[in-house]
Image (tube, rainbow, N blue to C red):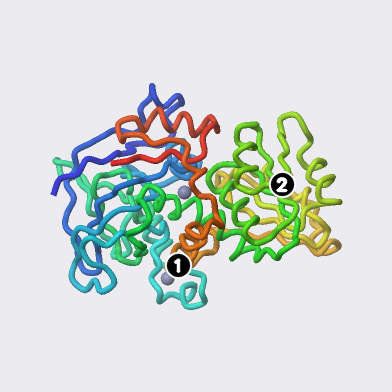
Amino acid sequence: MKTVAVVLEEMGRPAPYAKSKPLQLEDLELTPPDECEVLVEIVAAGLCHSDLSVINGSRPRVMPMVLGHEAAGIVREVGPGVRDFQPDDHVVFSYVPVCGRCTCCQSGRAALCERGAVANTEGSLLSGKRHFSRSNGQELHHHLGVSAFSQYTVAAEESLVKISKSLPLDKAALFGCAVMTGVGAVVNTAKIQAGQSVAVFGMGGVGLSSIMGARASGAFPIVAVDLLDAKLALAKKAGATHAVNASDHDAVEAVKNITGGGASVTFEAVGSEVVLAQAYAATARGGKTVCMGLPHPSKMLSIPAVSLVAEERTILGSYMGSSVPRRDIPRFIDMYEAGLLPVDLLQSSTLKLSDINAAFDDLAAGTVARQTVLM
Ligand SMILES: [Zn+2]
Ligand SMILES: [Zn+2]
């Protein structure tokens, strides 16, 4: 069948993207779902900083690629052997396909699925197959098994989570990356307890979701750190009790003052080794520093080594919020519907697929939380 999709031909084109146009709308061929695969009509897809990191080359991927990894849609066709889905089901995508059989999956570490990681690195589905091609026969790579910036996509059933039809799909999309990653880091990775002090660095979609997760977990105080007052105002609505603008304050000192010597748990949601070092410095003795952002692979973190022992500190990596998608996406949706996670405030604006280059300029400028493409 035919689909209109956004293709990233090469990484590293210079900003502004409205001018250099790294993303091009193309008419592509999409082959039908094979064994254990599903054809999904994308209804809504979010623009995430990890997409931007592929565009600017700080998260290198195989090119050319149909980009996009945060989405929700409707099942239109299922391949042979699919048991968990049928046409008309509403689904959210997990950006790690969860095979359920590898050592990581078997130990409850679905976000680290070994087969999923191999497929994502190769830009294929879990089966190793690719379904998008150009009219000249050239195959295109899948982005994290999702490739959301397309009218239709084919995904492994292991990349899908069935959701209730009562939730609007533009809201549902946010649960696929921002909410699963940000709330998951709080409840799964850090296992926040009521009354623990928290500081979150970076108020993008993931950072704001962490603020919501911290609030729902009963953390206090909850300190939001960002460079923009507008983002900090959003953080207050998300549940932050304090806001620190790092462009006119020493963020580490400010967090220490508010929390009485350092936050029990800090979260880094920028993807900067410099900010990660600040988050570590703002963590209390005996505390945890949780890294959610993805710095360029060449970047190194430098910390006082002795502090790990003498101050019993812990640094925790959190990929996809250490989530198990089929457990966590439905429960985070339940929390949203119960009023515990004000996810609506993440959505800054909606746009058409044809406006996507300029929208990534806005994301790069840091002025928006989540922009959602409506197909
Ligand atoms: Zn993302
Ligand atoms: Zn696995």
Q: Which mark is residue 241?
A: 2
Q: Residue furthest top?
A: 19
Within 10 angstroms of label 2, few (less than 14), some, or many (20 or more) residues?
some
Task: Provide the secondary structure element on which disc 1 rests.
Answer: loop
Instruction: Name the amino acid type tagged 1.
Output: Cys
Q: Is residue 137 above or below residue 34?
A: above
The residue positioned 72% from the left and 35% from the top of the image is 246
Count of numbered circles on the image: 2
Q: Position of residue 372 (x, y in %)?
A: 40, 41
Instruction: Name the amino acid type tagged 2.
Output: Thr
Which quadrant of the picture is home to ligand 2? bottom left
Within 10 angstroms of label 1, few (less than 14), some, or many (20 or more) residues?
many
The residue positioned 60% from the left and 36% from the top of the image is 231
Q: Is residue 103 above or below residue 259?
A: below
Q: Which mark is residue 113?
A: 1
Disc 2: residue Cβ within 8 A of ligand 1's nearest atom: no
Per the model, the C-alpha gap separating discs 1 and 2 is 36 Å
Q: Position of residue 159 (x, y in %)?
A: 35, 62
In the foreground, 311 or 85: 85
In the foreground, 129 or 243: 243
Task: Provide the secondary structure element on which disc 2 rests.
Answer: loop
In the foreground, 105 or 265: 265
